[in-house]
């Protein structure tokens, strides 16, 4: 259990660093919706959420297979 938490922690750190180094990679994809009215902006990153979800699912399945 402790080893799993450490692995996930390291993965989250790596993902966070990658997202900080390449902010243009995610967030401006087709399917991400932005509404702007006056001073209010609402951002709905549908495509970005799906891509990140798929990537995290693949990583989690790979880790689960390694730990079996």
Image: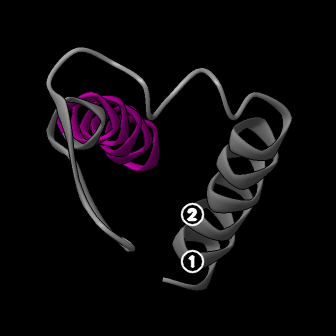
Q: Which residue is mark 1?
A: 5
Magenta part of the protein: which range?
Answer: 50-68
Asked if 38 appears above or below 21 in the picture, the reply is: below
Residue closest to the eye, 46 or 7: 46
Q: Is residue 65 left or right of residue 47?
A: right
> Is 24 a magenta residue?
no
| Residue drawn at x 44%, y 49% as measured from the top left | 67
Q: Residue furthest front?
A: 38
User: Residue 8, labelled with which disc?
Assistant: 2
Secondary structure under tag 2 reads helix
> Is 52 a magenta residue?
yes
Displayed quadrant of residue 32? top left
Asked if 43 appears above or below 24 in the picture, the reply is: below
Q: Give the x, y percent position of residue 66.
A: 45, 37
| Residue drawn at x 39%, y 74% as measured from the top left | 39
Residue closest to the eye, 14 or 46: 46
- CB contact under 8 Å: marks 1 and 2: yes
Q: CA distance from mark 1 to mark 2?
A: 5 Å
| Residue drawn at x 34%, y 38% as measured from the top left | 52
């Amino acid at each position: 259990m402790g080893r799993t938490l450490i692995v996930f922690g390291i993965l989250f750190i790596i993902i966070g660093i990658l997202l900080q180094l390449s902010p243009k990679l995610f967030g401006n994809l087709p399917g991400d919706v932005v509404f702007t009215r006056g001073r209010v902006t609402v951002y709905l990153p549908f495509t970005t959420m799906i891509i990140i979800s798929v990537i995290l699912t693949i990583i989690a399945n790979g880790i689960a297979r390694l730990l079996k």
